[in-house]
Image: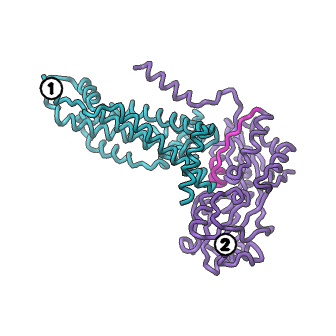
Chain colours: A purple, B cyan
Amino acid sequence: MFKLISRILVLFFGINVTSVADPVIVVQSTTSTANSGLYDAILPQFEKQTGIRVNVVAVGTGQAIKNATRGDGDVLLVHAKAAEEKFVADGWGVDRFDLMYNDFIFVGPDNDPAGLSDATSAVDALIRISSGRALFASRGDDSGTHQKERLLWTSAGIDPTTSSGDWYRETGSGMGATLNVAVGMNAYAMTDRATWMSFGNKQGFKVVFDNDQQLFNQYGIILVNPSRHPHVNAKDGQIFINWMLGEKGQMAIANYTLDGQRLFFPNAN
Amino acid sequence: MQALSDSFGLAFGLIVGLDPDLLEIVSLSLKVSLLAVTFALILGLPLGAALAIGRFPGRFGLTVVINSFMGMPPVVVGLLVYLALSRAGPLGVLGLLYTPSAMVIAQVLLITPIVVSLTRQTIAELDSQYREYFLSLGIKRLPKLLTFLWEARFSLVTVCLAGFGRAISEVGAVMIVGGNIDHLTRVMTTAIALETSKGDLALAMALGVILMLIAFSINFLIALIRPSNNSSITSKIFSR
């Protein structure tokens, strides 16, 4: 009987297959970098060059930052500059660096009922949606995308949450789930270009508005502060950050294309 | 519904081609859930049987509480285990977060109430029939408990299958405590959630089809080894 139990216990702990010897880091990340295939393209290159395994937990900016605050990661990679700077200012992160950028876009039904294609700016696009009471699917989850969206609404002088549940639909979900909701209910949505390019359920939706400076989407990378969380693998985390910001990482990011299009543009200093 | 017909073709292709990623996530799903069911049985069978035959104050309340835990949402269990295993949490030093072990722990917490509750129900029926008989023979509680568990073994197989079904199909708990990390903690259900979020609905559905095939196969095999006529204590007694 005890032999059986001890065998089962061995199985239980043996189920964690990676050996203790391999260096490993956990990256708390936004979802666009994962879903678009960027990590699948660049991480094997990093692992081959350094022997460090990178485990990515792709949950969305808000959750990633909270997880990193709790010390459940070694590196933070998200796209919400204000929140990132607060993370460092509060002492949870060592330093924040620009990593790469792309842009946000508005997507919507082919017939474009609110006429976003004629909008003169991102703010104008939101005004058209609001005044036309066109269905709009928002992230509603404190993600980088959501924070940018909220900023734009503020610039437009509109509070869409007063119409929450009416034409303003807050899904409280990740980008992919929100896009599924948007195409399902024929609603507009704001998304990062990388997620949209790699999204498989477009159902006739198209890009209705883009190319506004306001829609600039900057990604940042931060090492979780080992002084606040001593167990953090700061050594390998720093190697990862140096690689991403250095020539090899920046080139790997630049070289990643989907259907011939670049999804992320490296811009580390 | 194009996605649905596409998905059967995709599923067939993945299975026949022995897609390595598919094999990896199927194998991890089975490892995690089978291990969780094993632990849940070790904990739950004796507890359920003891709850059935025991007579102690608070027995009614305890039964109600455990029955209620059967309805615990997986995402809540996941959250609780995450808070416990998080580095900022009480068991953070164990470093179990984002490992398959954490997923097993979460699933054990999910399934054990089901095992306890259904075992209690099954054994209680036996107990109500044979309690006085065993009393009159002067048989102590432990041998009686073991006898009941053995006699009810075929019904208890269904309890196992219910527990396994709950484990292999849940996504909320393993997503939070495992992190859906590629090649590490990605199982069938979290892979389905991921492919859905990427809009690859046909692939997500294909994985769902494969998951159901696995469930059918396991249930089919179990049904094969069960005899059609359950022997019962009654027939054993009166055949003397």
Which numbered marker is on residue A100? none
Task: Say which residue appears at 44% left-offset and 38% top-offset.
Answer: B217
In the depicted structure, whether residue A166 falls above or below residue B6: below
Distance between mark 2 and mark 1 Cα atoms: 76 Å
Does residue B98 appear in the picture of this structure? no
Quarter-of-image position of residue A158: bottom right
Q: Chain of mark 2?
A: A
Q: Between residues B91 and A148, which one lies in front from this camera angle?
A: A148
Q: Between residues B145 and B66, which one lies in front from this camera angle?
A: B145
Q: Between residues B97 and B18, which one lies in front from this camera angle?
A: B18
Residue B213: x and y, percent?
48, 43
Residue B69: x and y, percent?
38, 46
In the depicted structure, whether residue B130 falls above or below residue A115: above
Question: Which residue position holds label 1?
Answer: B237
Over which residues does the magenta segment extend? A51-67
Image quadrant for the C terminus of chain B? top left
Question: Which residue position holds label 2?
Answer: A110
Q: Amino acid at mark 1?
A: Ile
Task: Say which residue appears at 68% left-offset and 36% top-offset.
Answer: A230
Mark whose residue sits in front, 2 or 1 = 2
Secondary structure of the residue carrying numbered label 2 = loop
Please check the rendered image and state whether residue A52 is part of the magenta-colored stretch, yes or no.
Answer: yes
Residue A201: x and y, percent?
63, 60
Question: Would residue A20 appear left or right of B59 to someone viewing this image?
Answer: right
Q: How packed is label 1: few (under 14 Cα within 10 Å), some, or many (20 or more)? A: few
Does residue B51 appear in the picture of this structure? yes
Q: Amino acid at mark 2?
A: Asp
Please check the rendered image and state whether residue B119 is part of the magenta-colored stretch, yes or no.
Answer: no
Secondary structure of the residue carrying numbered label 1 = helix
Task: Say which residue appears at 37% left-offset and 41% top-offset.
Answer: B114
Residue A191: x and y, percent?
69, 63
Q: How packed is label 2: few (under 14 Cα within 10 Å), some, or many (20 or more)? A: few
